């Protein structure tokens, strides 16, 4: 990895992309230093970024899409492994596992299982304790979703994604993220400065990236390490 400089973050990123002959969706951007104008010419600092080429398994817009697909030496190996996975059996084992976990947490609930496809398991948790299940900023349900993903990965279903929901929380959260993205972009443009959002899971960061992907006035990138990785919305 090499550090590239520019008057703005975007300038520095473009310098690196040109040098590496890559496009922005092929690299992970880490901001090393924000640009500073200084005072009367003193203390001026250029923006500095570090670019790293993404591996083939990374697919999130800009930097963050989580990948649960294993890496194989041959495509045929991937197909053979995929064909051996019984998604219905995996989903039932996951439902049994979640039953045990939620009962241990003291919830009264019912699980509604929906196989969206061979690669997607959706589980709605029907409970009258939805606020407690969701937790502050979605931390509890997101932690349970991560735990569920780890569980099915250990069953060999690395190419299957899990989504846990309750009381239509995911849809409501998605709408809030779109509104947050729009508001943050307007603030960044009005103030001419990058805006840092609070840490959020990778699948939520992806929604922010996607919401602003067609905005000609701002760029988005991620910085920091999990679980404190954040999105930055910066004016171009």
Image (cartoon, rainbow, N blue to C red):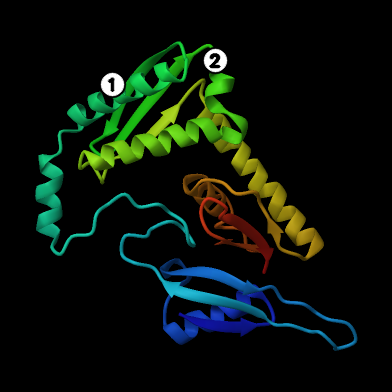
Disc 2, SS: loop
Q: Nearer the viewer, residue 109 or 181?
A: 109
Name the residue located 60 percent from the left edge and 70 percent from the top edge. 31
Q: Which of 153 and 234 is in front in this view?
A: 153
Classify 169 as above or below 103.
Answer: below
The answer, for residue 217, to whether it is visible in the render is no
Classify 4 as above or below 224.
Answer: below
Classify 207 as above or below 147.
Answer: below
The answer, for residue 158, to whether it is visible in the render is yes
| Quarter of the rendering containing residue 148 | top left
Q: Which of 139 and 26 is in front in this view?
A: 139
Q: Which mark is residue 36?
A: none
Q: x, y percentage for residue 193?
A: 76, 65
Classify 218 as above or below 211.
Answer: below
Q: Could you tell me how far apart the alpha carbons at marks 2 and 1 are, in whole angstroms?
A: 20 Å
**Is residue 90 left or right of 169 when viewed as pictured?**
left
| Quarter of the rendering containing residue 151 | top left
**Is residue 174 left or right of 91 when viewed as pictured?**
right
Name the residue located 22 percent from the left edge and 31 percent from the top edge. 90
Instruction: Name the residue beneath numbered marker 1.
Output: 96
């Amino acid at each position: 990895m090499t550090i590239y400089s520019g008057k703005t973050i975007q300038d520095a990123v473009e310098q690196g992309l040109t040098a590496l002959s890559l496009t922005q969706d092929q690299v992970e951007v880490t901001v090393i230093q924000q640009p500073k104008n200084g005072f009367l010419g003193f203390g001026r600092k250029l923006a500095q970024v570090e670019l790293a080429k993404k591996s083939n398994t990374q697919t999130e817009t800009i930097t963050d899409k989580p990948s649960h697909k294993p890496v194989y030496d041959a495509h045929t190996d991937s197909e053979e492994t995929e064909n051996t996975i019984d998604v219905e059996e995996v989903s039932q084992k996951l439902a049994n596992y979640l039953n045990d976990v939620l009962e241990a947490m003291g919830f009264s609930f019912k699980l509604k299982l929906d196989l969206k496809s061979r690669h997607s398991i959706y589980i709605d948790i029907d409970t009258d304790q939805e606020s407690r299940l969701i937790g502050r900023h979605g931390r509890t349900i997101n932690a349970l979703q991560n735990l569920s993903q780890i569980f099915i990965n250990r069953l060999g279903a690395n190419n299957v994604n899990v989504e846990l929901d309750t009381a239509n929380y995911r849809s409501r959260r998605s709408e809030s993220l779109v509104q947050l993205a729009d508001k943050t972009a307007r603030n960044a443009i009005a103030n001419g400065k990058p805006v840092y959002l609070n840490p959020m899971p990778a699948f939520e960061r992806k929604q922010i990236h996607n919401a602003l992907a067609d905005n000609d006035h701002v760029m988005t990138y991620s910085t920091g390490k999990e679980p404190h990785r954040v999105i930055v919305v910066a004016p171009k």
